[in-house]
Amino acid sequence: MTSESIFSLLGTLTPQDISFVQTFENPVMSEFIDGAAGSVLVVGMIIVVGLLTYYRGWKTLWFDWLTSVDHKKVGIMYIVVAFVMLARAIIEGVLMRYQQSIAVNDPGILTADHFGQLFSTHGSIMIFFMAMPFITGMINYIMPQQIGARDVSFPLLNAISLWLTAAGAALVMISLVVGKFSTGGWTAYPPYTGIEFSPGEGVDYWIWSISLTSIGSTLTGVNFATTIYKNRAPGMTLFRMPLFCWTSLCTSVLMIFAMAPLTIATLMLALDRYAGFHFFTNDLGGNMMNYANLFWLFGHPEVYILILPAFGVFSEVISTFSGKTIYGYKSLVIATMSIAVLSFTVWLHHFFTMGQGANVNAIFGIATMLIGVPTGVKVYDWLLTMVRGRIRLTTAMLFSIMFLVTFVIGGLTGVILANPPVDFAVHNSLFLVAHFHNMVIPGVLFGMIAGYQFWFPKAFGFRLAERWGKASFWCWSFGFYLAFMPLYALGLMGAMRRTVEWFRPEYLGWLQVSFVGALLLFSGFLFLCVQLVVSIRQRDRRRVPAGDPWDGRSLEWSNSAPPPEYNFAVIPHVSGKDAFTQMKQEGQAYASPSAYEDIAVPKNSIVAPVIGIAAIAFGFALVWHIWWLVALSFLAMWGAVIARSFVTDTERVIPASKVRADHEAWLQQVRECTTTSREQEDTNSNVGRAEVLA
Amino acid sequence: MRRHQELTKILVRSAGGLLLLMLSSMAAAASVGFINPAGPIAEALRDHLIFIVVVMMVVIVPLFIALPWVLWRYRLGTKSGSYQPNWEFSWILEVLIWGLPAVIVVVLGWNLWHQSYELDPYKPLASTEAPLEIEAIALDWKWVFIYPEQGIVSVNEVMIVAGRPVSFRLTSGTVMQSFMIPRLGGQIYTMAGMVTKMNLLASEPGQFRGLNTQYNGMGFANQKFMTHAVSQADFDRWATNMSASRPPLNQAAWAQLTKPSVLAAPQFFGSVAEGFFTAVVAGFTGGSHHHIKADGTDL
Amino acid sequence: MKREPLLHPGLNLGSTDEYAHNEAEPVIFGFWVFLMADLVLFAILFATYASMSVQGQADGPTPTDVFDLPSAFIETMLLLASSITFGMASLALKYKADGLHLVFWLGLTFCLGAGFVGMEVRDFWVMTQEGAVPQRSGFLSAFFLLVATHGIHVTAGLFWMIVLLVQLRVLGRTTAVKLRLMRLALFWHMLDIVWVCIFTFVYLFGVAQ
Ligand code: HEM
Ligand SMILES: [Cu+2]
């Protein structure tokens, strides 16, 4: 076959779309960076494949992970995706900061087109492929264990959601090597993103990667909500659930309601682009204002989808490391619920400047400020949780405290932006960029890092090295202030977002400080990686087989670390809040159950990976107009679902005798463990059995 | 060892130099943007902002004071504060932490409501003089300003009268953009087929940079224009001069303008068809994608 | 394993099949939640249509010009009837031990549903012939998206029905198949409700204007 006929099978794809070819043909700095990024991706893949082959890891990878439907493994895989994508998006952030810090009356190193792709991928990745997978993974891993369940309600659906999200992430990654990404930002406002102004594959990459993950998230929301409503252990009433479960519930409900507007908006944009419809075009009755409404009808609840689980993490971390029950539990629940409801009533604050009347603006502005009330309540509830406790400044706790401090500053600027007149002055400026990073970095990212530090020993059986964790913490904290405080000033000085080159020398100093801050943030990320490597190498010294290294309060700490695949040998009976603390105080923890039963766990399934791989092919084919592959992959996805529905043998039974043997062996081990006082928490004497103070 | 010291010295010096550079540039920076207002609108916006910050301090300052204190007093191993692991509620505190933010929101909300009307960009500014009418069309990547009374057009430069209100009517001939002159006031979107409005006033003569704030592609960073606030006499002289010496905005010129491009220098046109702005707006609202002829009729 | 006697909204198997009834709880509940998400999707399509049908006509055809009310009315009747027949199928699932009743009612539902889709496709084709294509105006774009999304849902329901008929044959009346039939029933009735809204707000209101 000649190369021409091969390419005729590949739709609109041509050799020139491969980024290395572009770099070769046009060797300027911007292309070179693009090519290098592509190479890192390709070389990275080759190294991973090589390592897997060398260590004979393929079997483990496939049978223990990729085909698994165990919520714990699915959760971990979500977080791995989040970490990989975080690495890319941070580097992009630093690169943009570098460009802006040198591009004052100077073109800098990036072309406008490349810069446009960078803020679009950075924003889209951070929101959809870093923050979303991170919170979803965290909920997946923790929530079922906290409510005393063996798995989520629909384990296979859970794996399918993971694979849809991963497919979306894969598409964004592919766009690094094949073709270009959108330059329309993470919001992709038409008509700019319409076919008339953005021909080519870029926006299509955005559309399909986002569509895949938004469907995945809808299904996740359904799954989590059902799990929380239906799978709680006996006695685990809603008002005895740990706060993390409450925030997970609110997030799931938000996902159920808020993802649809996004799905529809991307679908309409796709119809405009592919089929000549007129939803958002300039002419023939299209109206881009509908897009703005739809997008933010999703977009505002989205920020609460992201931040509520982080609020949950902070509640758990602060309560645990203060050695105290949470202050104002009911008040926190009510605050969470009101935030969830209110989050649907404020979307218009993202476009106060679109020319609707003062009264409409004022109403939405006030609604926005109202959210400040429950949020303020939460902050004070966390503070009061520490009062009369005994506070340990572990890495997780440090991140939580820095969150409190930094978040109120973001809250302040949020209230400022809620005022339509002021928003008129700083909308679209770096002030806004500073504000939302001021919410998502301490809010979402610090929350997820805190949760990762907190629950890592549970998931992998050994503690992370605190020293590196703290080094990372200081980088993240100082880095944040250095990187983003100058942007507030720049915004007030009229510097706008998404700008590749400046013409005001006054901006220079601020931009340079901000770049230094971005470097620090990046080091914070590197230290997290170092921490992981160091901890893995020292894992034998750091093990916590008894499973409770922090004197935990909720049920997930009551089983081994890592937990058995069925989580609980016997489903616990719950009689109050802080279920595990109560058990420990009443001497019920680690007691041998009176009887064991057979446990049915779901079998592994190749359906989810098949759907995931078909989804990648589907998205890719749509981007490049490869219609035969579109049809084929579509059939493959639904074929897999239908075929699966004919499989009757989907469960594996673990006999009671085996459960008994394993569980009793572990209990025996726990009884032999020495207990650790909180002062000794960060020493190797901590094997996961907490000292119980009478 | 000596090497090491040398290196340290160099590092310290360059860091110091950098710091100095930054500080001086930051000091200079306060002269741009709406924090250095040049008109009543921008000034009101700034004062409004300061008011919000001050009021918000009521909830923020207590946290900043209490947090370190709590961390210290209740640290592990201390004998100072009592340890009550089951303490979880107090009505007094509860009323306080719900009540205080609520009161603040009421105060700020009241203020917000009034300011939204007061500073509505659509609201004509109180003045003894009739406002100067300007029609602005956003193109890729330039701004076209039409002075309907004077019948002239300027591109990427706008001339206004100091002390006299300006009333902008805005639309877009391409994707959505956002019009702003930071030192004079806020911004408003411009959209094809639609008209938005903005009222501004420059108190003193001066030059203020204006720009599009909504990303619209490759030339976005360059889409800036200069606003000249001059006396009425200077404005009139300028207008007469323009209409006498500059070519008309004809079809060819308009076709040239609508092509995406970054202009090296501002352009001026001495005449323009009446109703041109309206025709540009109408060009998008009808049944087919019209192309606008310079005489205002459909092509 | 005995659960508390919770009932979910919709037809419960209850005493006629204790085991499937107990299994149904999370599955049916989860499906209700899913339907809710799906309804949000339709709600948004309705909202878009509401705005575009008025503002997005772009001097093109108006609703009165292009809607074929008698045809839409017949479609409504077909779909309503199919909901009744599916109701009969559900009752057969609960009370009739033999499979024949069930298959008969499902088959009838299928025919009615297929009739609906067929007529809808014909409507679309006629509109296309008159130049009322989605590319013509925002109003038509919104119309086609809303109505076709419903139509695609119905078509998916038909495929689902075929799969379940095959499963009744291959797997028999197992608990899993029963639960799927119960979910398809909910899905089908929901589509009926959505169609009633489409008929009212799109067709009747459109022509009334
Ligand atoms: C960790 C260090 C980070 C750095 C250095 C960084 C840097 C940047 C930069 C330079 C921009 C472009 C600003 C502009 O438009 O001028 C940007 C935009 C953005 N960032 Fe970040 N960021 C970071 C973290 C995050 C995180 C954690 C999130 C979200 C979870 C996030 C979400 C976004 C979004 C949504 C945009 C807007 C993209 C757009 O304009 O469409 N960033 N960031
Ligand atoms: Cu918002």
Image: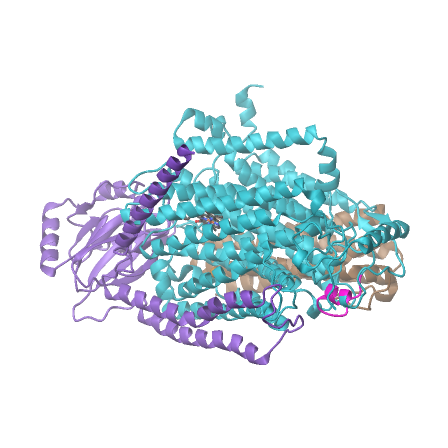
Chain colours: A cyan, B purple, C brown
- For this orientation, the residue located farthest to the front is B1
Is A50 displayed left or right of B98 in the figure? Answer: right
The spot of residue A247 in percent (x, y) is 62, 62
Q: Is residue A452 above or below residue A633?
A: below
The spot of residue B106 in percent (x, y) is 44, 76
The spot of residue A92 in percent (x, y) is 47, 42
Location of residue A547 (image quadrant)? bottom right
For this rendering, which residue is in front, A190 or A309? Answer: A309
Residue at 60% from the left image edge and 53% from the top image edge: A135
Magenta stretch contains residue A645: no
Is A400 displayed left or right of A422 in the figure? Answer: right
> Would residue B146 be visible to someone looking at this image?
yes
> Would residue C45 be visible to someone looking at this image?
no
The spot of residue A335 in percent (x, y) is 57, 70
Residue at 63% from the left image edge and 32% from the top image edge: A48
Tell me the magenta residue range. Answer: A572-584
User: Total label count?
Assistant: 0
- For this orientation, the residue located farthest to the bottom is B92
- For this orientation, the residue located farthest to the top is A2
Location of residue C204 (image quadrant)? bottom right
Q: Is residue A608 above or below residue C183?
A: above
Magenta stretch contains residue A580: yes
Q: Is residue A501 above or below residue C4?
A: above
Residue at 33% from the left image edge and 45% from the top image edge: B16
- The quadrant in which the N terminus of chain C is found is bottom right
